[in-house]
Amino acid sequence: MLVLSRKAAERIKIGDNIVVEVRRVAGNRVTLAIEAPREIRILRGELEQAATDFEGAKPPSSNDQASIASAPVPFVDATPQADLSDHGMAAFVG
């Protein structure tokens, strides 16, 4: 692992097409800007395992989709918060 020190506005070039720039340093927090081709995947370290787990998950089977389709729909109260009749509009009551 290569460890470098950089100040705000300084850049690091990785290979031919990736550039990392330190945008801001405030206390123990550093803001980075990364220029890379779209096909290069960039993830925060804490999301790497979640992304791997997501990609490894199997797509839902037709049985799973049927159980999702038959799941009860939650009730949504569509009662209006204000009477709009004085604006030429009837209040919506669901």
Image (cartoon, grey):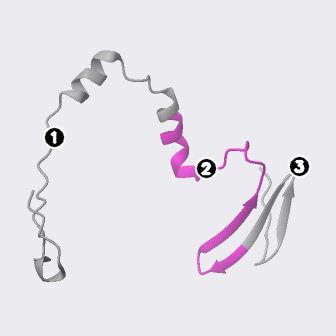
Q: Quadrant for residue 70, please give it.
A: top left
Tag of residue 15 = 3
* Alpha carbon distance from label 2 to label 1: 35 Å
- Residue drawn at (25%, 29%) of the image: 68
**Pointer 1 local density, CA inside 10 Å: few below 14, some 14–19, many at least 20:** few
Q: Is 44 drawn above or below residue 85 in the view shown?
A: above
Q: Any magenta on residue 58?
A: no
- Dot 2 corresponds to which residue? 43
Q: Tag 1: residue type?
A: Val
Is 15 located above or below residue 69 in the figure? Answer: below
Residue type, mark 2 in image: Leu
The disc, 2 or 1, on the residue closer to the chain's N-terminal end is 2
Quarter assignment of residue 69: top left
Residue 73's label in the rendered image is 1
Rendering coords of residue 87 (x, y %): 18, 81
| Magenta residues (range) | 23-52
- Mark 3 vs mark 1, foreground winner is 1
